[in-house]
Structures are given as structure tokens and as C-alpha cells.
Amino acid sequence: MSDSSPLANLDSQRDELIRQINEISDFAVLREQEPLLVGKRSLLTTLQRTLGQIAENERKEAGALLQGARRLVEDRFNERFAELEMVERAAKLEADRLDLGDVVVSAVRVPVTVGHPNLVASTQRELEDVFVGMGFSVADGPEVESDWYNFEALNIPPAHPARGMWDTFYVDLGEPETVVLRTHTSPTQIHLMEAAVKLGDPRVHAVMPGRCFRRDTPDARHLAAFHQIEGLVVDRGITFADLAGVIETFTRAYFGPTISSRLRPAFFPFTEPSAEFEITCTICQGDGCRTCSQTGWIELGGCGMLDPAVLEAVGIDGSEWSGFAFGFGIDRCAQMRHQIADMRALIENDARFLRQFS
Ligand SMILES: [Zn+2]
């Protein structure tokens, strides 16, 4: 073949193409270069078109040479294509396997979120534990009560001004204003004393936790549906000193030895004498702060000796038996213990808040 032939450099051009193919190590690049290496825009295709310029007697040989070169280049291209495709597929499989691995690993690493009791429920259990440790049993009562259990038996007759102390929800059953959502847990005291009297032994040592309802506008310190725990002791020879001792023992057991209690005179229709009980401010430990209005004390609940009228209402002889009752808010207790600024956070289902107490 003459030097002027378009195929004069065919061997070196073929080798250069094969070298280029060998150099490509990325499958995507190889596919991208395919038209230039072996396709319509390739040198070999261009040379194919030049065959017409070659003298007829040389054309056949030139065609065979070109065809031979093309086959070598195409074979090498196809081999390289297969090699890189395999590498590509293996890498993809590896990546998929790693992804799968990550899923498995992350399922193990990320703690599975399981539910936990709301702070109010766990506080209630802690309070029950403290009182059970002090010899009390735990009793439950209905949330819907007749007027008699919620008010009258507790020495709050109809039209008594003391009823104004509770903004009551009424349930529309029968006579108007005869069925209520209990405004306090105190009606359970009446149920317990009635049951004890039926059994012929009026002694009661029990706490009664539960939900109560008042037509309060919710704010930082009040909820319309809230939780109280009520305590009741009926026995022979029970005195106010026993009541003060129980309150103090509870306060130290639940809030810790640096927190103590004190009683201040108050009025409740169902106890006489009555007292509000206060505990050392848990925020300033008694030094005085904004929360306790600089007094160092925070009111927690009410208590007192059972009014003889209440004992009489359930058929207990007040000359033989005496007792005391106390009650306070479970939500308030949780608020104090965990220094929660706004009580509404307890019922707002904000997982970020609730998770702090899991
Ligand atoms: Zn304080």
C-alpha cells in the first residue's frame, strides 16, 4: 500500500485506538466515548468512507485491512465494555449491600422509641409508693358522682355558699344538677367509709388518687381536668398531731430530706379544724424566690380533722372514732418536683417535653 493511501497509518491508528480503550477505566466514560472509538463518528468509519478514493485494484485489500483493524478495535472495545460493565455492576451491588447494611445497622443503633407513662401517671405511681410504704392502701372511685357524694355527704348542703369554691361540671342525667363530674377525690372517702361501716369496722387508712374536673380556665397552674390524691385515716384516738406527722413524713419521703412542711389555718366544709399545707419551695430551697413570692414556702394541698358531720353522714360514731383527711394535686406535685413552669405542658402532647421524663 502506498504512502499516500489513507490507510498508510492504519496500524498505528489501530494501536492508538486500542491504547485509548485500555486507558478508560470508567464504564460511563467508555459508553460516552463509544461513538468516537467504534461508532459513526470514529476514525475507522471515516477511513471506511475514504475507500472510494483508493485505486480500484487496491480497494479490496484496503477494505480487508480496514475490516481487520476494525475487528481488533471492536473486539477490544467489547471486551473492555464487558469488563467495565462487570466492575460497574459489582460496585452497584456492593453499594446496595452497604445500603442494606446501613438499614440493619441503623435499626440496631437508633434506640427504638417505645412509649412511657406520662409524667402525671408516673408521679401518681411514685406518690402511691410513698403512701403504701407508710401503711396506706390505694383505693379508686368513680369520676361521675351524685351530688350527695360530691357535696352533701361532705358537709356541703345544697345552696351552701361553700359550693362556690368549686366551679362544677354537671352531667345531664335525670334531675338538673344532681350528677356531677367529681370536683375533688373526696367523694371516694365517703364510699370507703360506707364500705367500712358495712363490714362492721370503720377503720380506714387509704389514699385515693384520681382525675377531677372543674370549670377552670387552664393556665400555668390550673387545668380543667386534673389529678388529685386524697388521704383518709379513720381510727380510734386519731389527733391533729397524727395528721401533721403524716404530712411531714410524706413531704420528706417524696421531695427529699431538705424539704419540710408546715400547716396554716384554713377552711374546708368537711374538716374541722382545717389547714392548708405548705412545703419548702423546691426552687429556692426556702431562701425565697419569685415562684414562692419570696416566702420560701409553696402551698401544696389542704387537710384537716374529719368534721363530725361527715362521720355522721356515713353512720360512724364520732364519739368513738376520729380521723383526718388530706388532699393535693398530683399535677401540681409533678410541677413542683420537676420545676415545670407551665402545667399545660403536661397535656399538650409535645413529645420533646414529654421525652424529658421518660
Ligand atoms: Zn422559692
Image (spheres, rainbow, N blue to C red):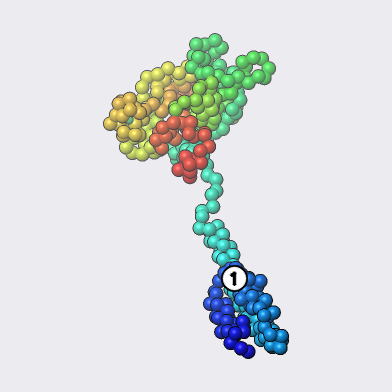
Judging depth in this view, the residue of 119 and 250 nearest the camera is 119
Q: Quadrant of residue 285?
A: top left
Outermost residue to the left? 287
Please say whether residue 355 is visible from this viewpoint: yes
Q: Residue at x 67, y 83 (%)?
A: 54
- Secondary structure of the residue carrying tag 1 is helix
Q: Quadrant of residue 115?
A: top right
Q: Residue at x 48, y 34 (%)?
A: 345
Alpha-carbon neighbours of circle 1 within 10 Å: few (<14), some, or many (≥20)?
some
* Residue type, mark 1 in image: Gln
Q: Position of residue 126 (x, y in %)?
A: 46, 40
Q: Residue at x 47, y 22 (%)?
A: 306
Q: Please tell me whether residue 298 is drawn above or below residue 114 in the rendered image.
A: above
Horizontal arrangement in the rendering, residue 342 relative to residue 37 (left or right): left
Q: Which residue matches tag 1?
A: 33
Q: Position of residue 353 (x, y in %)?
A: 47, 39
